[in-house]
Every structure is written in C-alpha cells, then in structure tokens.
Amino acid sequence: DTLPAISEDGGVFVGLKDELVALNRTTGKEMWRFKADAAVGNPIIADYMVYFATKNRAFAVDRRSGQEIWRIENAGRVELVDAEGRVFLVSESQSYALDGQTGDELWTFPIPQGMGDMLFAATSDSIFVGGTNRIIAISSKTGKVLWDTKEILSEKEKFTESDEYIQPPLGEQGALRCFTRQTRYNRFTAPLSLATDQEGEKVYFHFAFCAN
C-alpha cells in the first residue's frame, strides 16, 4: 500500500495492492477504483491528473473520473511533476521526462555509475538529482546538465564540532554551503532529502553521514 495523495478539491488517492483508489476526503466514500497490472507506487497529483507507476508501467489517470489517459511500458518510478506539467521518472539506468498530457518522452538522462538511490527536487527550470556524494542539476526543458558537483566531499575531509547536520541551501552562485553543529562524523554517504523553497529559487539538501 502507498502513502495517500490529497487534492485541493477533497479527493484522497491511494494505492492498494494493484489498484489506485479515489476517496472523498469528507465522507470516505469511494469515488472510483482503477485496476493496474501490478502493485501501485505512490501517486502524485498535478492539475486534474494522477500519476503513478507499477513495476513495469507508468500511468496517468484523470483524477475526476478514474479514466486512463495514457500508459507507457518499461517505465521507472514516478518521482515528481513540475509546474510546466512535465513528469519525471527514474529507472535503474536512466531518468527521463514525459509530457504529462500525452505521455510522450521529452528527454532522457543516463544515470552515472555509483549514484546509488537517487532523490529529486525541482525549481522553475531545473531538476536536481542527489545521489551518493554527488548532486547534478539538469535543465527541465532539455535534459542537459547545468552543473555537476562530482564528488562533494572526500573520505578524508573533516568537519568542525557540531551536534547535527542541517539542511544547507545552495548559495547564490550555486556553491553548496554546509552548516554543521557538534559532530565528528566525517564520511559522506548520501542525501536524505531534497526540497525547494516556495519561490523555487533555492534548493535544500539534508545529508546523512557515517562515523569512522
């Protein structure tokens, strides 16, 4: 089963085994039920659409009626939808963008080796992909790399005394600013979460560290 997605007009959408179920938020009454081909992943709402993926396919369903709008084969998991209606997915070998209305592929981006489990965040014109010791900014429109941190921290890099590692924003020039308080952890592993501010101008990364 999945986490529920809630629309502004009172719909609750949740994956239950191989079905996507829509409920009325006030009454709990079932509005419709969509049968998929396998276990349903977490749904994402954008405008009047609900996007989700199963093991082998990605779907777009009209959230008002439960009618299938499109499906694609051999899809990865649905990560997010940006303000322009582009749907971003990731598979084992690549991330890619689809037109949210038609399901047409817009671009693909091969995943560099060693990125591990990736996390995504979006601003108005960029997608940020975080993985093991690396963050990549990609143009939402073209899929081209805008910048790539490569290796952020070396295995030997030491940090100042701190008690936790808090979410650091990207600086005005795109430089990563890290704030630490009272830790002796010194080995970078991977981002725990990615998020953007309300204006979509800054990206915040929350990292995990391992002690020696």
Image (cartoon, helix red, strand yellow):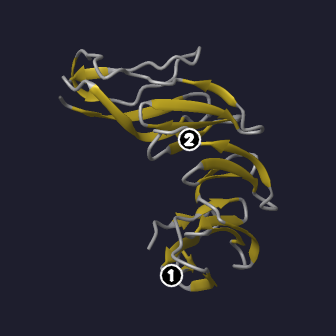
The residue located at (62%, 48%) in the rendering is 95
Which residue: 51% across, 76% down? 39
Image location (x, y in percent) of residue 56: 60, 69
The reply to whether residue 86 is in sight is no
Nearer the observer, 66 or 132: 132
SS class of the residue under badge 2?
strand
58 displayed left or right of 180: right
Report the Cα–Cα distance between label 2 and label 1.
31 Å
In the image, is 144 to the left or to the right of 154?
right
Residue 144 is situated, as x and y percent measured from the top left of the image, at 72, 33
Q: Of label 2 and label 1, which has the lower sequence position?
A: 1
Residue labelled with disc 2 = 121
At 38% from the left and 21% from the top, the residue drawn is 153
**Crowd band around label 1 with a 10 angstrom C-alpha radius: few (<14), some (14–19), many (20+):** few
Work out whether residue 12 or residue 158 is closer to the camera in this orientation and state it: 158
Q: Which quarter of the image is occupied by the N terminus?
A: bottom left
Residue of label 1: 28
How many numbered markers are drawn?
Answer: 2
Amino acid on which disc 1 is placed:
Gly
**Image position, residue 202 (x, y; %):** 56, 28
As helix, strand or loop, the secondary structure at mark 1 comes to loop
Quadrant placement of the C terminus: top left
